[in-house]
Image (tube, rainbow, N blue to C red):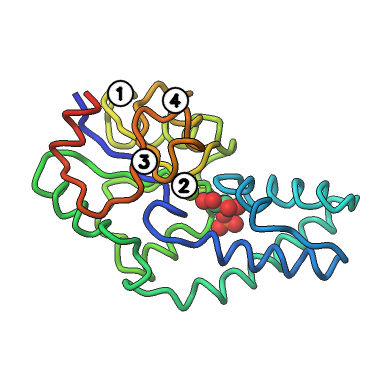
Amino acid sequence: MIKGFLFDLDGVIVETAIFHYQAWRKMANDLGFDISEEFNETLKGVSRMDSLNLILAHGNVVLLEEEKIELATKKNEHYLTLVSKMTADDILPGVREFFAQIKQTDIKIALGSVSKNAKMILEGVGLINDFDAIIDGTKISKGKPDPEVFLKGAAELGLSPEECLVFEDAVAGVEAGKNAGMKVVGIGHAEVLTKADIVLKGFENIDLRQLLSKIQ
Ligand code: BG6
Ligand code: MG
């Protein structure tokens, strides 16, 4: 029986991928190459340093570790100026209504994000108090598709993996949920999120009981 929901943040609760893309693209352009929106798709759910390494490899740029840290720091400062303007209006459609349905049940809610900025973003959009547990990039050592983030989320909720349902928009995130031994709801396109147990376009008009009856 499902007793806990584990939500990814970026692309599930708020749409921040565009801001990550803008900040990474500026960095790449400054280094003399460009990254496409299609390439940006491959960065979803991937940690900051892993994303940087993928981008540098894409541009055939080789750097020292300290230069990489400097670039990642600068990218994050740019990203923070972009996300600091986010408000409740930036919560993805249907999320608040879906949370309201969850609150009428005994199901617990946790965050499972590799972002180190997750708490700041949840505070900015006014959702931080809706979570019973928050596992973010500051609490994990391995990024998705490693299951660590979701296993820690389940542990903090006091639940077993089989009692948890993951909501994820990234291929790496869906894999992380499956690697954790959990059922996964993909948010996005079924052709992309092929390993998810079920795929929704988003949370608009989603009936919690109907969803649970399909997944259990
Ligand atoms: C994930 C995003 O949620 O967080 C990735 O999908 C991002 O694109 C990662 O790289 C790390 O985020 P942050 O905020 O710690 O740089
Ligand atoms: Mg995501």
Q: What amino acid is at disc 4?
A: Lys
- Counting residues from the start of the chain, the first of labels 4 and 3 encountered is 3
Q: Is residue 82 left or right of residue 54?
A: left
> Disc 2 or disc 3, which is closer to the eye?
3
Circle 2 residue: 113
Name the residue rendered at 33%, 73% in the picture: 89
- Counting residues from the start of the chain, the first of labels 4 and 2 encountered is 2
Query: Which disc number belongs to residue 167?
Result: 3
Name the residue rendered at 77%, 63% in the picture: 71
Pointer 2 with pointer 3, Cβ within 8 A: no
Q: Quadrant of the N terminus?
A: top left
Q: Tell me: residue 193, above or below residue 19.
A: above
Q: What amino acid is at disc 2?
A: Ser
Distance of mark 1 from mark 3, alpha carbons?
Answer: 16 Å
SS type, badge 3: strand
Q: Tell me: residue 159, above or below residue 77.
A: above
Q: What amino acid is at disc 1?
A: Ser
- Residue 175 appears at what percent x and percent y? 50, 30
Extreme left residue here? 104
Circle 1 residue: 160
SS type, badge 4: helix
Q: Residues within 10 Å of mark 4 (few under 14, many from 20)?
A: many
SS type, badge 1: loop
- Residue 201 appears at what percent x and percent y? 36, 47
Pointer 2 with pointer 1, Cβ within 8 A: no
Distance of mark 4 from mark 2, alpha carbons?
Answer: 15 Å
SS type, badge 2: loop
Circle 4 residue: 178
Query: Which disc number belongs to residue 90?
Result: none
Q: Is residue 181 left or right of residue 82?
A: left
- Counting residues from the start of the chain, the first of labels 1 and 3 encountered is 1
Q: Who is closer to the viewer here, 44 or 124?
A: 44
